[in-house]
Image (tube, grey):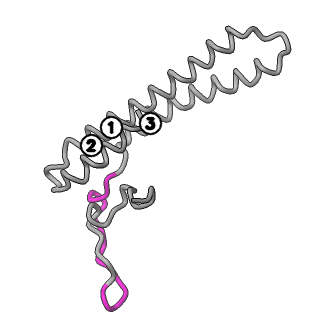
Amino acid sequence: MTRASRSRVRPEVTGEVAPDATGTAPPVTPTAHLCMPEDARRRASRRLAIARGHVESIMRMLDDPHVYCVDVLRQLKAVQGALSGAGEVVLRGHLEAHVATAHERGDTHEIIEELMEALKYT
């Protein structure tokens, strides 16, 4: 299975139907598409902005020939923490919005496979 075929924009989940003989497909309802929850997107974005700030700080530190190694390591750890936090926010949003409701949508098997894939990145 290719990475592109694992995308959440899957016809069997979104309710998309292949075009008929006229070349048109019925409209897809917006609620059928599984999207990242707004709150999770906002919180993950905030954590990534923090990580970006730390990375920019590290880059400035490295411009200084007298930079202290432990200070750089401290900032690197802060970046790792911010990235880890963003990952946790995304995973929690996925669990709450998609995994917990998979049975209602009838895609339990697919969501379990996707969850197993997602856990590889945590």
In the rendered image, residue 115, in percent from the top left (x then y), is placed at: 30, 43
Judge whether 19 appears above or below 58 on screen: below
The answer to which quarter of the image holds residue 116 is: top left
Q: Disc 2 to disc 3, how far (Cα)?
A: 15 Å
Q: Is residue 22 magenta?
A: yes
Is residue 105 inside the magenta stretch?
no
Q: For the point 37% across and 60% down, which residue is it?
A: 9
The residue carrying mark 1 is 93
Q: In the rendered structure, which disc, 1 or 3, sits on the residue that comes first in sequence?
A: 3
Mark 2 vs mark 3, foreground winner is 2
Q: Main secondary structure of the magenta part?
A: loop
Q: Is residue 49 above or below residue 101?
A: above
Percent across and percent down for residue 112 are 24, 46
What amino acid does circle 3 point to?
Arg
Contact, mark 2 vs mark 1 (Cβ under 8 Å): yes
Under circle 3, the secondary element is helix
Where residue 121 sits in the image (x, y, percent)?
Answer: 42, 37
Q: Is residue 79 left or right of residue 96?
A: right
Q: Amino acid at mark 1?
A: Gly
- Quadrant including the C terminus: top left
Examine the image and state in which quarter residue 60 appears: top right
Say which of 83 and 42 sits in front.
83
Residue at the location (25% across, 54% down)? 110
Is 62 positioned to the left or the right of 26 in the image? right
The furthest residue to the right: 65
Label annotation for residue 97: 2
In the rendered image, which residue does mark 3 sit on? 42
What is the spatial separation of the Cα atoms under label 2 and label 1, in whole angstroms? 6 Å
The magenta span reads 20-34
Callout 3: 10 Å neighbours few (<14), some, many (20+)? Answer: few
Q: Secondary structure at mark 1?
A: helix
Q: Amino acid at mark 2?
A: Ala
